[in-house]
Image: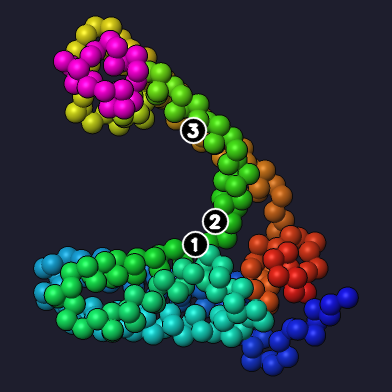
Amino acid sequence: MKDYKSESPQTPWRHKIHEVIFEADTPSGKWFDIILIICIILSVLAVMLDSVQAIRLDYGEALIYAEWVFTILFTIEYILRLVSVIRPLSYAGSFFGIVDLLAILPSYISLFYPGGQYLVVIRLLRILRIFRVLKLVQYVGESRLLLQALKASRRKITIFIFTVMTIVTILGSLMYLIEGEENGFTSIPKSIYWAIVTLTTVGYGDITPQTILGQFVSVIIMLLGYGIIAVPTGIVTVEMTQAFKSVRAKGIRACRGCGADNQDEDAVYCKYCGEKL
């Protein structure tokens, strides 16, 4: 039988780094999360301000310095995360590992493309820096419950979406027959588009029914839309209630092997990599 205990990090400094970065229940871990959240928010704010031409002209150089400061900080954090776990490749291939990499990679890629003003397409790489806002998700405990509720309700939501698509297809085809091309309903796909816009109560107004029968059908679709909106909300709410009931008031344990922290309450080994908790 494989001895998982022998794979645990032996050096105290790796254990300490893991405790600070991954264990959110410790005082040092909480402070680390708070500081990191502030850095993420400031870095995203810098990206947004850099997209405003007037601000970029006056403070462009300062924003560049700020960008590289945040890039270096996130790079150090990413390296420490890889160092503190036993299986760094498992963490690097995880969702948050990929997000961490996407948060820092564009800045380094830009170093290999000087004269970016002539290669406008390279500016698209700067937009990727907005991915670092996703790093906030892993520091909000309730997000885990929300993801669990969405995962549990995925089949019901899928059936609901299929039902809605069936309804809009029927109603769109019906409106195509009622209104016709002379009133803007030039095809069934365009009529379905109108039905979706009307059912979701968005109402762009680019296509409007002109006949009395068409307006009557529109009223039915609008009223139906208000009732349909409540369905997915109720499905997710029920699953969230179940998720809250299943969670006890205990600390969240993070695996030292891959960094995953959504472990079962009575788990002895990590359900992702098998490392002993």
Answer left or right for 170 relative to 18.
Answer: left
Q: Label 1 is placed on what type of residue?
A: Val
Q: Which residue range is magenta in the image?
A: 172-192
In magenta segment, residue 47? no
- Residue 161 - label: 3
Answer left or right for 267 relative to 11.
Answer: right
Does dot 3 land on a helix, a strand or a loop? helix
Disc with the residue nearer the chain's start (3 vs 1): 1
Residue 193, quarter of picture:
top left
* x 60%, y 79%: residue: 88
Q: CA distance from mark 2 to mark 1?
A: 6 Å
The nearer-to-camera label among 3 and 1 is: 3
- Residue 143 - label: 2
Q: Label 3 is placed on what type of residue?
A: Ile
Q: CA distance from mark 3 to mark 1?
A: 26 Å
- Whole-percent x, y for residue 90 in the image: 61, 73
Answer left or right for 196 relative to 80.
Answer: left
Can residue 164 be seen? yes
| Residue corresponding to mark 1 | 137
Residue 265, quarter of picture:
bottom right
Residue 144, quarter of picture:
bottom right
